[in-house]
Amino acid sequence: MIEASRPAPILELTSGKRDIVLQRPWVNAPGFLGFAGEARECVDIERLGAFVTPPLSLLPRTPARPPRLLAAEGSFLLHTGHPNPGLPAALREHRRAWSDLPVPVIAHLLLQTPDEAAAMAAQIEGVEAIAALELGLGEVGASQAAALVRACAGEVPLIAYLPLGTPVEVFAAAAEAGAQAVSIGAPRGALPTPSGALVRGRQYGPAVFPLALQAVLQLAETLPVPILAGGGVYGPAQAQALRQAGAAVVVLDGVLWTEPERVLGSEPAGD
């Protein structure tokens, strides 16, 4: 009896010691599906290629002061402060739930310094529930990005996560330093509150999509590694456009809180 051949994976990354394989072209943006179990209440996790944890810092972080969500025409701004219990506590509290998920888990790390980055990566080396690290590098230059990536090199595949608007040379430096893939994160923005105070945060929504698509086109011409990209994806046509532009995987954010089935119910074709 001849076994039916399995479809080729959408994305495979390896550090030489540990691999991550994505069978579907979707991941969630960090923070949009909770820490693990709570995500199942609104999204069928099996429809994703991998699950991305909320941003994790070495030490605990408390929520930002309100307001934490501000709406604008075509977009919204999140200012959360990336609250989390700190990496050691998160590993204790959630590693079993991550092991039970039907898809690989990518831990998103908030990185400050190379020493801190190395300490966080070392804590994850022996955690089999985590298949890859997404390195939140923040707004850094090329040399800083490279130093942070090198500090995390080890057994776990690395994805360098940089905000939309980051120069191409910074993405390139992260890839050259050892990141097996790059991810385009939400851009930074600011909005006034009704009282006139300015709030800075991360921008999401349909208005972001043209900028994300342009960024993928630019990076795909330069980088030798796969690209994960999202921003303003609320339907299959936008997801398909990102894939055709060169994104290997589409990152979903706001749509996961509204109508996830609009995107997760479809499979964009390959390039």
Image: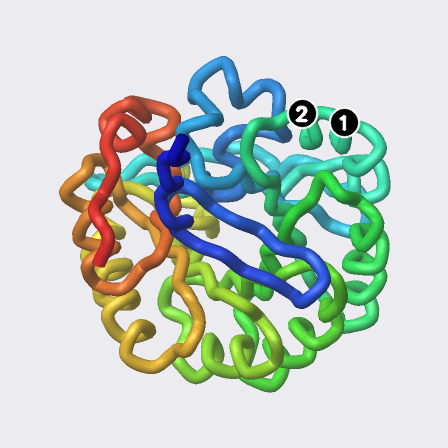
Whole-percent x, y for residue 25 in the image: 36, 44
Task: Name which residue lies at 38% across and 63% down.
Answer: 164
Image-quadrant location for residue 204: top left
Question: What amino acid type should be assigned to the residue bearing mark 1?
Answer: Arg
Rendered residue at 23%/32% (across/down)? 266
The numbered dot on residue 207 is: none
Tell me: residue 241, above or below residue 182: above
The reply to whether residue 190 is in sight is no
Furthest residue in direction left, as rendered? 237
Query: Which numbered disc covers residue 100?
Result: 2
Q: Is residue 247 left or right of residue 128?
A: left
Quadrant in the picture for the C terminus: bottom left
Q: Disc 2 residue type?
A: Asp
Of the pair 104 and 195, the residue shown nearer to us: 104
- Residue 205 is left or right of residue 122, and the answer is left
Residue at the farthest front position:
1
Image quadrant holding the N terminus, namely: top left
Residue 121, x across and y down, in percent: 77, 59
- Mark 1 residue element: helix
Rendering coords of residue 195 (x, y %): 41, 37
Q: What crowding class fits label 2: few (fewer than 14 Cα within 10 Å), some (14-19), or many (20 or more)?
A: few
Of residue 166 and residue 176, the one placed in the foreground of this image is: 176
Q: Residues within 10 Å of mark 1 (few under 14, many from 20)?
A: few
Distance from label 2 to label 1 (Cα)? 6 Å
At x 55%, y 34%, the residue is 103
Quadrant of res 127: top right
Q: Residue at x 46, y 47 (%)?
A: 199
- The reply to whether dot 2 and dot 1 touch (C-beta < 8 Å) is yes
> Which mark is on residue 96?
1
Q: Is residue 88 above or below residue 160?
A: above
